[in-house]
Each structure stands twice: as C-alpha cells, then as structure tokens.
Amino acid sequence: MARQLDEQIVGRFPVGRRLRVLDVGMGQGTQALRLARAGHQVTGLEQDATMVAVAREALSGEPEGIRARMRIIEGDGRDTGVHFLPGSFDVVLCHGVLMYVEEPDPLLAGLARMLAPGGLLSLLVRNGDALAIRPGLSGDWSGALAAFDTVSYRNRLGLDVRADRLKDLTSTLAGIGAPLHAWYGVRVFTDTAADGAEAPADVETLLAVEEKAGRTDPYRGVAALLHLCGVRG
C-alpha cells in the first residue's frame, strides 16, 4: 500500500515539494512516520491513547528534524473540523478506519473538506465485494455463503465490523467533491496468512506479486482490502 500511495503522490505533486499530510486514525504511526522521514509535514490524529503513546515513543527515537516535522494529536477522526481549517492539507490518509465507523459518510465529508484543491484522499477499506473469499479458502462454507449478502463481518480481533463496496464508495467520493482517481487491491494472495507469521525468504518477490495483482484485473477485485485514491476538485 505504501508503494501505491507513493505512486499517487509522485504522479500528482512536484518532486521535492514538502506536502502537508493528515493521517486520520494513524494507529501506531507507521505511515505518518514514513512520510515525515520523506520530508513531509505530517499531522497524526488518533483517538486510542495506547496507540498515541506507541506513536510518540517511536517518534522520540527519530532525529530532531523528523520530530519537528511530525505532530501527534489525540482525538476523534470525525472531529477534524474542530482541529483544522478547511483546505489545510495536500494529502489526507484514512487507512483501516472506516470498518469501525457505523455511518462513514459524515467522516468522509469531513476529510474531503480538509483537502486543498487538487489534494489527495487515500482510503484503505475492507472489500465488501470479497467477504466470502477468506471463509471460502478456509473451508468455512456456511460462513462463505452468508458473506455474499452482507457487508458485516467479524475481524481477527473478534470485533463485529463492516466493509465497503467499491461502487458505493465511488458514489460517495463523487458526492463529497473528491472523485475516485485510482484504486488498488491490497492483500490479494496473503490475506489468509497466519497472524505473526514470519516473512518468507523471498519477501521481495512476494511484494512484487502483490503489487502486480493489486493493480491488475480481475485479481484486485477480490483483494481483502481496497486502496482508493480520490482527488479534491
């Protein structure tokens, strides 16, 4: 997904430009810190105090220049308007968040308002059109059958969450003024790997396969996750 995001950034903004980035629901700050290291001015917004502490600990070990480029705020992603003025960012990330939000449209509209004209909105969501894949490949036939007619599922943490369908998000992005520009699949072949499994010796080949599949039909359409990139008009 990082490679996909970098492709969109390079294709949209001048090389060397220091971008204003907002990472909503940044978790432990993996993407936020990576972009700060790349020279961008990054703000991370996260409501989980434990994740905020982990992100701050990781940031504390970075050189002073990187620490100066990254700001961490503890808060709800649905309250971006409380913290920032409209049009304050060139790139807004919202990765792995929508599945926990029962009504995502207000959140998405708020994220779009944060973008400057021509800004990039990057979403990572559970693919509602492929929920039957994981139980089907695991031999859970009743679970696979039930998954065809729902966007609800139980994740690996045991939480009841929701997925999004590409068609619905395409419509939503158009409606909030950040129409879909590009989309990718993420975890096409690796979704059934056990949590905590060691990376294979040929991990670079694995990544090359996943990257190729994530931009190639019909493979990307059955990926566990979808990476959608909208552009503010």
Image: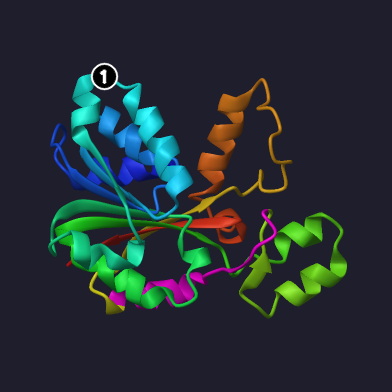
Q: Report whether 4 appears left or right of 219.
A: left
Q: Amino acid at mark 1?
A: Pro
Is 140 included in the stretch rendered in magenta?
A: no
Against 151, residue 8 (above or below) is: above
Q: With 136 as the anchor, is 90 left or right in this view?
A: left
Question: How is the structure coloured here?
Answer: rainbow
For label 1, the SS is loop
Q: Which residue occupies the foreground of this view, 124 or 196?
A: 196
Q: Nearer the viewer, residue 126 or 184?
A: 126
Residue positioned 61% across, 74% down in the render: 151
Quarter of the picture holding the N terminus = top left
- Taking the image as drawn, is residue 216 in sight? yes
The answer to whether residue 124 is above or below residue 192 is: below
Residue 59 x/y as whole percent: 34, 29
Q: Residues within 10 Å of mark 1 (few under 14, many from 20)?
A: few
**Residue 161 on the magenta span:** yes
Q: Does residue 12 appear to the left or right of 121 in the view shown?
A: left
Quadrant position of residue 76: bottom left
Toward the viewer: 169 or 82?
82
Q: What residue range appears in magenta?
A: 157-174
Q: How many marks?
A: 1
For the C terminus, the image quarter is bottom left
Can residue 29 be seen by looking at this rendering? no
Residue 154 screen position, x and y as percent: 69, 64
Q: Is residue 28 above or below residue 101?
A: above
Q: Image quadrant of residue 126?
A: bottom right
Q: Is residue 63 above or below residue 212?
A: above
Residue of label 1: 63
Residue, x 17% and y 44% (percent of image)?
13
| Residue 169, position as x, y percentages in the image | 42, 72
- Residue 203 screen position, x and y as percent: 61, 26
